[in-house]
Image (cartoon, helix red, strand yellow):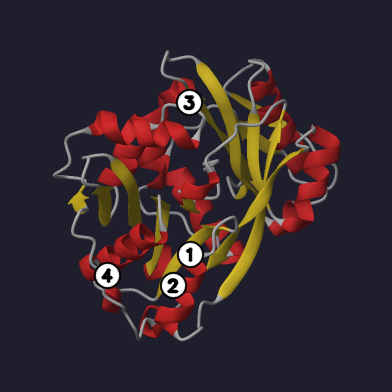
Amino acid sequence: MAAEEVKSFPGLPKSLINYRNFDKKTFNKFADLVEESERWSYCLQYFDILYKSFGEEGMVFITAVEEETKKPMGCIVGTFWKNQKGEKALFTIGTFFIIAEYRGKGLGNYLFDTLYREGLKYNIPLYLCSVAKMSQKYCEKYGFNLFRDYKCTAYSPKCTDFVKKTDISLPTHKVWNHTEFAEWDKLLQFDLQLSNGVVDRLNYLKNWFDGSLYTGIVTNEKDQVVGYASVQECLNNVLSVGPLYAESKDVVHLLVNKILENVDLTKYTELRFKAFTCNTDIKDLLIEYTDGNINYLADCTLQFAISSIPTEEKYLHCIVDLAQNFI
């Protein structure tokens, strides 16, 4: 397949499809449009992190623009995650967005079908996170019929609503800034529990941490990693917390406090949490800290095709992001 191709869809201007787009400015233009339309906020370093982590061999960014005017029409992104042997082990699909005026004419189906077929080539699990109105379509048409028993719920309290903070002391635990942390093999062993040993995310996580405002990694008295959390700066002065994994409610509490201590909330408008519903620790803490002003946004469904990847649910509190991440 050529890198670019002109396609026609009934009722639409001729579309220039780029199957191998690695242009940051183009991604950021779509990110602005997505945020404006859907309130999906991408961190400011999002494209750089993806490109550095997956490269052109592991990242698929397909875009559609009007051939004549180059006006954006739609896009979709896929990433190939590898195991510890360097083999492709999972394909995730996200950032699927069609500008409202171009919907319902076949363009969206074409972009999704194209990316979907790319993932099918390798006979590995496929994954996506869907909004309610799309979940059943993905299930029936594309076989994404393996569902997590829980969802992700997005909360976005205003930074000014964080009116309380309860101190917590865990004398046997230490919180490291990721820039000071050196024992990455221990973080990898913790993280492999979350993907049942299937996906090696260490390089990606390091890049994600480097793009963060703050990342805290918690170790216990045995020098084992028992949790970590990261906070990213997004468009329009929004902050986003993710990932947040922890072995206990106390570690969740500790990590949230560290975020509040290390980030100046007066510079931002909202602090967003994309929380797994299998654990309520984040929700409970937000209710306490904001006097109940947690600002619910939406629920998202987590679904696989071909096969699913088990996880240790007890550690899951906030997903990294809702586009390319499965835990």
Of the numbered discs 4 and 3, the one sitting upstream in the chain is: 4
* Mark 2 neighbour class, 10 Å CA radius: few under 14, some 14 to 19, many 20 or more: some
Label pair 2/3, CB-CB below 8 angstroms: no
Of the numbered discs 3 and 1, the one sitting upstream in the chain is: 3
Label pair 1/2, CB-CB below 8 angstroms: yes
Which mark lies nearer to you, 4 or 3? 4
Q: Secondary structure at mark 3?
A: loop
Q: Give the distance between the C-alpha atoms of the residues marked 3 and 1, in whole angstroms.
A: 25 Å
Task: Name the residue tied to disc 4.
Answer: 168
Q: Secondary structure at mark 2?
A: helix
Label pair 4/3, CB-CB below 8 angstroms: no
* Mark 4 neighbour class, 10 Å CA radius: few under 14, some 14 to 19, many 20 or more: few
Residue type pointed to by label 3: Gly
Of the numbered discs 1 and 4, the one sitting upstream in the chain is: 4
Q: Is residue 312 visible?
A: yes
Residue 172 on image: x %, y %: 20, 54
Image mark for residue 281: 1
Task: Name the residue tied to disc 2.
Answer: 285
Q: Can you tell which quarter of the image residue 159 is in? A: bottom left
Image mark for residue 197: 3
Comparing 63 with 95, the one in front is: 95
Residue 84 on image: x %, y %: 41, 18
